[in-house]
Image (spheres, helix red, strand yellow):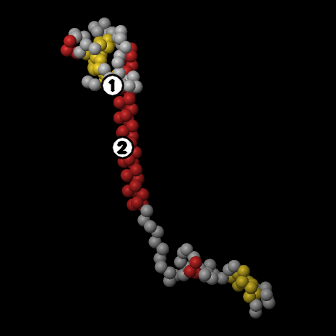
Amino acid sequence: MQNIESGETKFSTEKNIIFKKPDNVSDNPSTLPYPSNVGAPQIIPDDVHSWKQKNVIALNHQYQTEFQELKSKYEQLLLDYEWNSLIYKSNFNFEPIVGQVYHLYKKENGVLILSLIGPNEWNFDFLGSFELTSTFRWKKIN
């Protein structure tokens, strides 16, 4: 009987009988990425659950920290905007100089005044001292 091998199936040319090889048999078992017989060592998948859990906790902590930093920066930016808005809407009859400290007051009638006069030299409601930066933003000093 003459056999012609074609993949996993053997054909017999004499009687047209097909001999099929069992699924667990391989011609080259050493090249397979998995065990090919019951005597091969057991494949145990890596335990990635603990790795995932540890990294998810670390990543959540990192995101929470970044969120708190952004929130704090946003709140500070909003506060700076409000102060700058008040100062630019206030009354002053001079051109402010960069780096100079000015004081913001509120009169009894609600009018805001920006002045060089210090808080202990005037009787108006003192709101704060500010310095004009090079970007023409007002920075609160106290």
Q: Is residue 6 rendered to the left or right of residue 119?
A: right
Numbered badge on residue 121: none
User: Which residue is outermost to the top?
Assistant: 109
Q: Residue at x 41, y 53 (%)?
A: 56
Q: Is residue 81 in view from this perspective?
A: no
Q: Which residue is mark 1?
A: 139
The answer to which quarter of the image holds residue 3 is bottom right
The answer to which quarter of the image holds residue 69 is top left
Crowd class of label 1 (few under 14; some 14 to 19; many from 20; radius 10 Å):
some
The answer to which of marks 2 and 1 sits earlier in the sequence is 2
Q: Which residue is mark 2?
A: 65
Which quadrant: the C terminus?
A: top left
The answer to which quarter of the image holds residue 53 is bottom left
Q: Residue at x 39, y 19 (%)?
A: 85
Which quadrant: the N terminus?
A: bottom right
Residue 96: percent from left, percent from top: 35, 16
- Element at label 1: strand
As drawn, 68 above or below 31: above
- Element at label 2: helix
